[in-house]
Image (cartoon, rainbow, N blue to C red):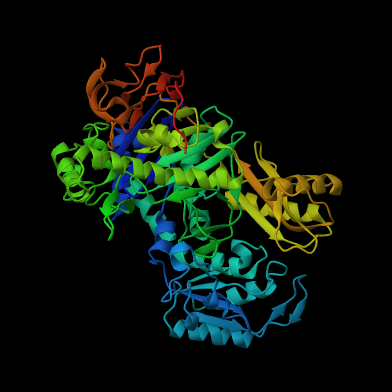
Amino acid sequence: MGYTIGVDVGGTFTDVVLGGTFGAIAVAKCLSTHYDPIAGIVAGVTRALGDRDPAQVTRVVHATTLATNAVLERKGVRVAFVTTQGFRAAVPLGRYARVEEDRYDLRFSPPPPPVAADDCFEVVERVSARGAVLTPLDLDSVRRAAAAITARGIRSAAVCLLHSYANPAHERQVAELLRESIPDVVTSSEIWPEIREYERATTTIMSAYIGPLMASYLSQLRERLAEIGIRAPVHVMESSGGVISAELAARRAVATIESGPAAGVLAAAGTGFPDVISFDMGGTTAKACVVRGGTPEITNEFHVGGKGSFGGRRAGTGVPIKTPAIDLAEVGAGGGSVAWLDAAGALRVGPHSAGSSPGPACYGLGGSEPTVTDANLVLGYLSSASLPLTPDLAAKALDRLASPLGVSREEAAYAVHEIVSASMASAVHVVTVQRGIDPRGFALVAFGGAGPMHAARVAERFGIGTVVVPAHCGVASAAGLLTGALSTDRVLSRLDAPDSSAVFTSLATDAAADLGVSLSDPGVLVSRSVDVRFKGQSHDLTVAWTSSREVLASRFFARYEEVYGIAQRGEIELVSYRIHLTAPTSPPPDTTGNGADGDGADGGGTAAAVPRARRAYFPESGGYAEVPVHTRDTMADRPLHGPAIIEDAESTIVVPPGWAATLAGTRAVHLTRSTTCRTS
């Protein structure tokens, strides 16, 4: 019997899911080890394996925030930027849009550029947007740049020449010369050959910035897994929800920047509901994404870092990355988010998180600041699990808020619960209401260690009547990794290419080489799309490819009206050609939870043979009241009406008054509104 392992490393917990050929799975949840993330992975994998033979593991799929954290914390390697003569200032000058709190700040200073001005170098050459060589490449200028980079002690370089997507010959020559003295060199034509010079430059720079870190990390991960007997291939989740080999992830590290959040969306898409809102709340952040027709929304450009408001990231406030990614909204609200009072004495929650060290006060690991987890424990929503929780420490932490606010401990705790729910609702607002989507027609799929505790309250704010909590909801992202297909994307900008078939064939051949497969192999699928715009406009929209110009235009017109609300017609122009290639892997294990075993923490309790009861706080019930506490095993065939609590090993589901819970055949818990609930 072969096993597949999914590993998701979060800011607070490391989740591991072991999938078997016949559907049996085991799960493990342990605190993340930030000093050495691999130590937490090995501990979780060892726990999930139990007494099973590690040699029977055939595949390890990993979602990691290594790339994201390196960019946010500016811990990547020093990078030299090499570009066409006359354009070295493009990256240092950059682009920045002020958000609300910066708009009237007279002392405002923009963040530093991804590459310092002194580390930007020019070479003599010029290529037109159609690929014609206007100025031949001066090899001596390349050698001078290489010497200057080496003299500065820089060991990683990003090469992005003007219009190299149209003709990459000069970039390849520059890279060849630079590699004689610089170990790590990446080019924009290798990473993502698409128009828009600034975005293509920053995407290439970020790949050079985090590539050496990713290569080292994945190499160490393979070695440490081999030490415990696992010599299976290691695959990494891409930002777009596909899975690539560790070797390709090291070469194209920028494609893994949104690796962590993508896996959970795949789990939400597999719940059997065609239209859902994925709602993932862990220990540090909460994320939301729209899934329509079983397919997550994909964006071809996103920003990492920077600032935003109401759950979104304002374009121009972070580093633009021009690769496909699942379109998520994220807020700094999780179980570890710290509650605090601002200078005016108002209660705030997040974005700072206690993380796994020292963690919430109730963990007993040295933390003393009140967090969302502490508030939920005081409210009676949580109980001790395999990671013991100490109610007295949580109560003491909440008293630090209650006293200056002049309210009771439970009122302070519920205020924290309400504020963080409102903060998370802002992420749902961004991916639905702000984009003209009515969320009332969607089911909210809640997962993550803390998501099911807040899901019903978030749903109430939008009039959403159905909440789905899948089996093993606390480790859903790790479970989603087991369903990720081996796939990759390729793009090439060619303005109205005369032979589109040749472009698509070339892209598909390169993508197949990336995955180590042949286009003629059984099960290999290639989907084609194209970026289209009105002639004379500068922004485009992606639509499915067809060789019929008329059909292509009609698809673009329909998409244009959907995005902008304007029914417009006119001459169109084709800009960039895209392919998505998927290769078969072994059949994914059934992760519905039948026959599973597991352990974990973050709010759940151990399975009980009969329902229990405990005091929990619900304002609709007048405060604290005795409420039934079930597990999925003790839920009867009839609906369980709130207020009630359902405990898992890795999470807890809160059923507020006005809601009813039922257990589906897939072991998912469905919450439905049984009375009219508030909306806002």
In the displayed structure image, the side of residue 514 where residue 480 appears, left or right: left
Count numbered badges in the picture: 0
| In this view, 408 is above or below 599 | below
Image quarter of the N terminus: top left
Vertical side of 674 occupied by 446: above or below: below
Q: Looking at the picture, how far across and down is residue 426, in whole percent?
A: 46, 46
Query: Residue 69 lies in what quarter of the image?
Result: bottom left
One can see residue 17 in this view: no
Residue sitting nearer the eye, 444 or 511: 444
Q: Is residue 174 left or right of residue 404?
A: right
**Outermost residue to the front:** 406
Residue at the outermost top position: 637
**In the foreground, 3 or 635:** 635
- Residue 576: x, y in percent? 72, 58
**Residue 360 percent location from the top left of the image:** 23, 46
Q: Say above or below: 151 vs 273.
A: below
Give the residue drawn at x 54%, y 27%. 272
Foreground pick, 32 / 38 = 32
Q: Nearer the viewer, residue 122 or 548?
A: 548
Give the residue at x 67% y 48%.
Answer: 563
Q: Residue at x 55, y 28 (%)?
A: 273
257 displayed left or right of 534: left
- State left or right for residue 146 relative to residue 87: left
Location of residue 232 in the rendering, given as x and y in whole percent from the top left corner: 43, 42
Q: Is residue 13 visible?
A: yes
